[in-house]
Amino acid sequence: MQDDAKQAKLASELMEALTVDEPGFIPVVAIIELVWVLTSSFALVRNQVVQALEVLLQTKEVQVENAEWCGGRGASIAPALPILQTV
């Protein structure tokens, strides 16, 4: 969201340093926290949150914990996270 310039710069540098051979790891708890922040702080609606999460699933430089819950890379994450049903 780039709401904090210093933090956005650090996050961008981190993401750019990741590779397919040395990917980053995103635990499920971080995904749930991300959903909460996107909806409560940035007022994103369900389809916007789903789109953001699907981008993470499709990113080869990160591994999402339990990505197989939603069919693996490239699949829709919406059915996998019941929290999205209330967004």
Image: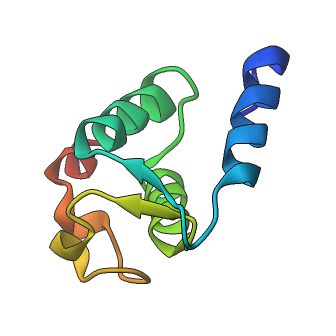
16 w.r.t. 37: above or below: below
Q: Position of residue 21 (x, y in %)?
A: 55, 72
Q: Nearer the viewer, residue 25 or 6?
A: 25
- Residue 1 horizontal side relative to residue 47, left or right: right
**Image quadrant in which you'd find residue 19:** bottom right
Q: Position of residue 13 (x, y in %)?
A: 78, 39
- Residue 81 horizontal side relative to residue 32, left or right: left
The C terminus is located in which quarter?
A: top left
Q: Position of residue 77 (x, y in %)?
A: 32, 67
**Image quadrant in which you'd find residue 35:** top left
47 w.r.t. 39: above or below: below
The N terminus is located in which quarter?
A: top right
Label count reads: 0
57 w.r.t. 82: above or below: below
The residue lying at 53 percent from left, 40 percent from top is 44
The residue lying at 20 percent from left, 75 percent from top is 68
Q: Nearer the viewer, residue 44 or 51?
A: 51
Colour theme: rainbow
- Residue 14 horizontal side relative to residue 32, left or right: right
The residue lying at 29 percent from left, 65 percent from top is 78
Q: Position of residue 22 (x, y in %)?
A: 54, 62
